[in-house]
Amino acid sequence: MNQEQKLRVYEIASTINGEGYTAGEPVTLVRLAGCNLRCRWCDTPYARDPTQGKVMSLQRIWAEITSYKCRNVLVTGGEPLLQEEALNVLIDKLARAEHRPILETNGSLSVEKIPHDCHVVMDVKCPSTGECEKNCFSNLVFLKPDDEVKFVVANRADYDWAKDFADEHGLFTSNGRVCFSNVWSELDPKKLAQWIISDSLPVRLSLQIHKIIWGSSTRR
């Protein structure tokens, strides 16, 4: 690992993964600072500004990660791929040390060069975000079979758009993992659950269980 390389980090913490197929598992959270999108309902606005982060060497980041003694390491943001070069060095190091690296990305930047041993959770932005046109749809060909595609849904229009998109791009038949999540402040999860049940969608309903545990203002 190149000790001279650095990442701009907002926080490193031990917590419970709140979303997706690894929800409920203990995880070391590495939240990087800076994001290239401004989603209307963003629930981590504090991490969008790169100047709010602390520049840390990979050596220091590694020391903090290993102090938590947790195999799962979730790198999120902000948008981690804005710091792709150093990020990939960290991911490689995690994989070689038998950690399980998980990367959450907003889907606007290419995932092609992410190390193969990393589990990718990629957003596809629905219309209500205001950033739908920023989706990098070519990313779909680079995802591995056990990677995840996540749609965050604010209303029925978002749901119908996400359902049609997933169907048109073969996400329901590719043995891939598809998650539908509700916008915490705008859509009752009961409604989203009923829509999924009514349409018999082969998706996972992903709730932000960290907010259920610690409250909606939690940053973890």
Image (cartoon, helix red, strand yellow):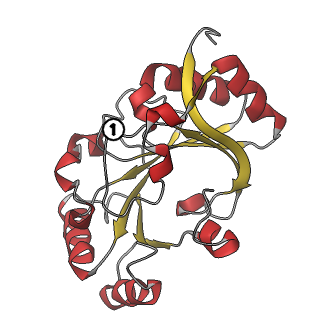
Residue 72 locus on image (x, y percent): 69, 45
Number of residues whose C-alpha sits closer than 10 Å to that of mark 1, classed few (under 14), some (14–19) or many (20 or more): some
Q: In this view, does 70 lie to the left or right of 11?
A: right
Say which amino acid is labelled 1.
Answer: Phe
Q: In which quarter of the image is residue 55?
A: top right
Image quadrant in which the C terminus is located: bottom right
| SS under mark 1 | loop
Q: Residue at x 65, y 10 (%)?
A: 3
Question: Which of the pair 8/2 is nearer the observer?
Answer: 8
**Measured along the vertical axis of the image, is residue 38 above or below residue 209?**
above
Q: Residue at x 53, y 72 (%)?
A: 207
Residue 216 locus on image (x, y percent): 57, 71
**Measured along the vertical axis of the image, is residue 136 above or below residue 8?**
below
Q: Which residue is drawn at 70% across and 18% down?
A: 59
Question: Which of the pair 45/74 is nearer the observer?
Answer: 45
Residue corresponding to mark 1: 142
